[in-house]
Image (cartoon, grey):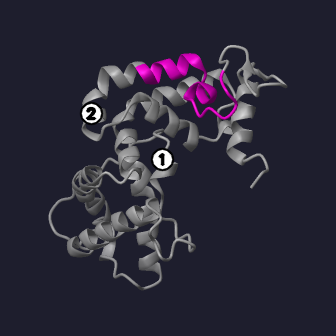
Amino acid sequence: MHQTSSRDKTLIRGRAALGTKTDSAGGRTVGPTSMPVDDPDASAVFGLEAADLLRRTFFCEAADAAARYGLTVDDVLDHCAEAFDLELLDTAVLRMAAAERIAGNLEDVLLAIACIRRDPRAWQDLDEDLGPMLARMCELRVDEIESMLQASRFLCAVRHRTLEVDPDAENDDGTPRLQDFTGLQPLRSYLGGPLFSLLQDLIRDGLVEGARGGTETGGERRPLRLAD
C-alpha cells in the first residue's frame, strides 16, 4: 500500500498542532520537535513537556517493572504514539492532562506492552493480578463459579485478540486488544468495562444464568473499585 497511512496522517496533524512543518526535501520537521515525519515518538503526540513527564515518571517510578519485562522508555513512548488518536489531543492542555494520567498508570502500560510482545511472565502477571478482580466484578451478576469461568474466558479472548490468534477475530464481539490500551485509565478499568458488557449480553440472551438480584453468591459484598 503506497498511500499515506492513517497513522502517518495523524502524526503529521500532530506536528501541525505543535507548530512544526515538514520541509519539502528531506521529509523532516522544522520547529520545536525536528524529527522525521514517520518517527513514532511521543513528543509528536504529546509535545516535549508532556513527553518529558512520561520519561521522568518512567525512571523514577517504573524502573523495576520495566526491568522485569526488559522494556525501555522508548518502548513506552512508541506505544503511546501508536495507541493515541491525535484528534483527541488538539491542545497543549489536553496533551499534558493525558500524559499525567498515563504517568499514573505507567506500570499498567508496561504490562500491556510486554503482553503484546508475547512475554509469558507478563501474561501470567495479568492473569494473577486482574483475574481475581474481574471475577469479583462478575459476581455482581452471576454466581461465584460462573464468575470465575467468565473472567478466565474473557482474559483468554483478550490474549487471542491481542496476539491475533483468534480464529473468530473477524467477528468483533467487543473484546479489547491491549494494543489499544492508552493508559488513560487503569488496565482493570479498560478490561472490566467490556467484560461486564459482554456478560450482560450473555445473560440477556439466555446463554448465562444471572443471579437473582445479583446477590445469590452469599455473604456481604465488598464494594469493587475498577477506577481511581
Stretch in magenta? 35-55
Secondary structure of the residue carrying tag 1 is: loop
Residue receiving disc 2: 67
Give the residue displayed 62% in from the left and 32% down from the top.
39
Based on the picture, tell me whether residue 123 belongs to the magenta stretch: no
Q: Residue furthest right?
A: 24
Q: Residues within 10 Å of mark 1 (few under 14, many from 20)?
A: many
Is any part of residue 13 visible from this angle? yes
Residue 47 location (% of width, % of height): 61, 21
Give the residue displayed 40% in from the left and 49% down from the top.
189
The quadrant of the picture occupied by the N terminus is bottom right
From the viewer's side, name the closer residue of 210 and 27.
27
The quadrant of the picture occupied by the C terminus is top left
- Determine contact: label 2, label 1, CB under 8 Å: no
For badge 2, the amino acid type reads: Ala
Residue 5 location (% of width, % of height): 72, 47
Q: In the picture provided, is 36 more to the left or to the right than 152?
A: right
Residue 168 location (% of width, % of height): 50, 76
Determine whether 113 is above or below 29 in the image. Answer: below
Q: Residue furthest top?
A: 32
Q: In the picture provided, is 217 more to the left or to the right than 165?
A: left
Determine whether 204 is above or below 131 in the image. Answer: below
Residue receiving disc 1: 181
From the viewer's side, name the closer residue of 40 and 130.
40
Based on the picture, tell me whether residue 40 belongs to the magenta stretch: yes
